[in-house]
Image (cartoon, rainbow, N blue to C red):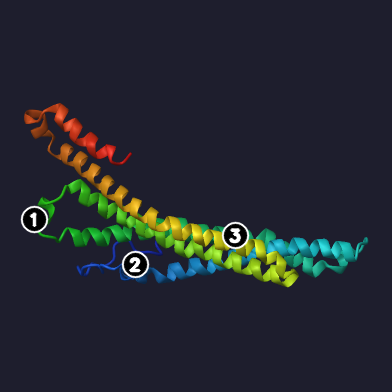
Amino acid sequence: MFRWFESLIPVFPPVDGRMPPRKVLPFYLHYLRPVWPVLLATLIAGLLLALVEVAMFDYLGRIVDMVAEQPGADFFKRHANELGWMLFITVIARPILVGLHNLLVNQAIVPGLSNRSRWLMHNYVVRQSLSFFQNDFAGSVANRVMQTGTSLRESAVQMVDSLWYIVVYTGTALYLFAQADWRLMVPLILWLLAYAVIMVYFVPRAKERAWIASEARSKAMGRIVDGYTNIPTLKLFAHGGREQAYVAESIQELA
């Protein structure tokens, strides 16, 4: 079963050699469009799971109301159908949806999309001119290929998994609160507004710092790999202290 999920995204598709788009959204579509069935299945699984999670809270309230309104020895007999449905959703449907969702994310998207993106990026980079590789560290170029594949996958998973789950969960919760008493919506709406303000403030700053950290990581990786690649030359001619300081400088930028 695990192998089947792992094979949903082919890691080595045919390579066309076209340059990936420069803009963010077309860049994402370039790599995500071929795997849209898996992403759609993850969206549907996340939707159903979020609805089940909210339904469980609704069930708790309904059970309390039923017990308060019609207590008695025949309680289970009178509400057998409704309680049976609640039991099915809680004990059977929810574990199945959780398992399906985790399999799609962890067995299909995480390994498949990451390695597929790296394979396509590698095949594009390796076709560049000799001067392209001479003007940068080999380790730095390799790190960008590996890191971009991981970042693409992580952001895609966040969009189709966490953000989608939050949207569905919050929207359904607001609907249930509105049915009970509109004033119950106020704390959740205030929390959403505060969350939006925090995101507007911190995301651009996090983006800038992430770019700096990525460049520093690629630089450090490039210097270390370059040193290992040219280790015979370093052993014969380089000054050990200078080489150590050269690498330490790039690592310091990561701190």
Residue 123: x and y, percent? 21, 61
Disc number lying in front (1 or 3): 3
Residue at screen point 74% across, 64% down: 59
Amino acid type, residue under disc 2 in the picture: Tyr
Question: In the structure shown, which secondary structural element does the residue marked by tag 1 occupy?
Answer: helix
Q: CA distance from mark 3 to mark 2?
A: 30 Å
Task: Specify whether residue 214 is in view.
Answer: yes
In the displayed structure, does residue 18 sit left or right of residue 254? left
Amino acid type, residue under disc 3 in the picture: Trp
Q: Quadrant of the C terminus?
A: top left
Q: Quadrant of residue 76?
A: bottom right
Residue 229: x and y, percent? 15, 40
Residue at screen point 73% across, 62% down: 87
Q: Which residue is mark 3?
A: 191
The numbered mark, 3 or 2, whose residue comes first in the sequence reads 2
Residue at screen point 42% across, 57% down: 203
Q: Quadrant of residue 150?
A: bottom left
On screen, 221 above or below 20?
above
Question: In the structure shown, which secondary structural element does the residue marked by tag 3 occupy?
Answer: helix
Amino acid type, residue under disc 1 in the picture: Ser
- For label 3, count other residues whose C-alpha is less than 10 Å away and answer few (under 14), some (14-19) or many (20+): few
Q: Which residue is mark 2?
A: 28
Task: Specify whether residue 88 is in view.
Answer: no
Q: Which residue is mark 1?
A: 131
- For label 2, count other residues whose C-alpha is less than 10 Å away and answer few (under 14), some (14-19) or many (20+): some
The numbered mark, 2 or 1, whose residue comes first in the sequence reads 2
